[in-house]
Image (tube, helix red, strand yellow):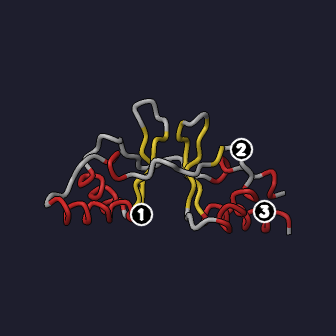
């Protein structure tokens, strides 16, 4: 049963996203205001180009320490190599990925366009829903 449940069935579709040109200090403000630990970075066509996490934002502090100024564009601090899943990836495969990697969520893409995000919690919801439906 779990093999038939896909990422797109349990992903979060309404995401806070950032632009590569967004000022990183504004991005930090957005993360704090929204209470989120990171956000996907998308270009004008909706293609995923990176991810800005709290850890990436720590580089803003070290950059300021070295160069005497805080700031710059999100593109200067984001992680450009993002591990993603396709909307049709089964939650079983995603659960395996979560066990093998330290990530808490994966961006869900369709033809490199961001369509959502699936978290560990989303996978747990899928497991519980199947359990309650079958047993």
Are the residues tagged 1 and 2 within 8 Å (C-beta)?
no
**What element does badge 3 sit on?**
helix
3 or 2: tag closer to the N-terminus: 2
Quadrant for residue 92, please give it. Answer: bottom right
Q: Position of residue 34 (x, y in %)?
A: 35, 59
Residue 77 disc label? none
Residue 130 disc label? 3
Q: Name the front one of labels 1 and 3.
A: 1
Q: Position of residue 93 (x, y in %)?
A: 74, 56
Q: Position of residue 114 (x, y in %)?
A: 53, 41
Mark 1–mark 2 distance (CA, rounded to whole Å)? 25 Å
Q: Position of residue 88 (x, y in %)?
A: 71, 44
Q: Name the front one of labels 3 and 2.
A: 2
Q: Which residue is mark 1?
A: 37
Mark 2 Cα-neighbour bin, 10 Å: few <14, some 14–19, many ≥20: some
Q: Residue at x 59, y 47 (%)?
A: 108
**What element does badge 1 sit on?**
loop
What quarter of the picture does the N terminus occupy?
bottom right
Mark 1–mark 3 distance (CA, rounded to whole Å)? 29 Å
Q: Which residue is mark 2?
A: 88
What quarter of the picture does the C terminus occupy?
bottom right
Camera-side residue of 60 and 4: 60
Mark 3 Cα-neighbour bin, 10 Å: few <14, some 14–19, many ≥20: some
């Amino acid at each position: 049963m779990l093999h038939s449940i896909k990422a797109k069935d349990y992903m979060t579709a309404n995401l806070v996203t950032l632009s590569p040109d967004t000022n990183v200090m504004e991005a930090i403000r957005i993360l704090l205001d929204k209470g989120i630990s990171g956000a996907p970075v998308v270009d004008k066509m909706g293609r995923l180009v990176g991810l800005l996490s709290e850890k990436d934002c720590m580089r803003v502090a070290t950059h300021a320490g070295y160069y005497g100024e805080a700031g710059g564009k999100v593109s200067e601090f984001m992680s450009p190599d993002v591990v993603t899943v396709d909307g049709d990836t089964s939650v079983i495969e995603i659960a395996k990925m979560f066990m093998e990697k330290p990530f808490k969520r994966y961006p869900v893409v369709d033809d490199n366009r961001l369509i959502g995000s699936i978290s560990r919690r989303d996978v747990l919801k899928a497991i519980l829903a199947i359990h309650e439906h079958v047993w």
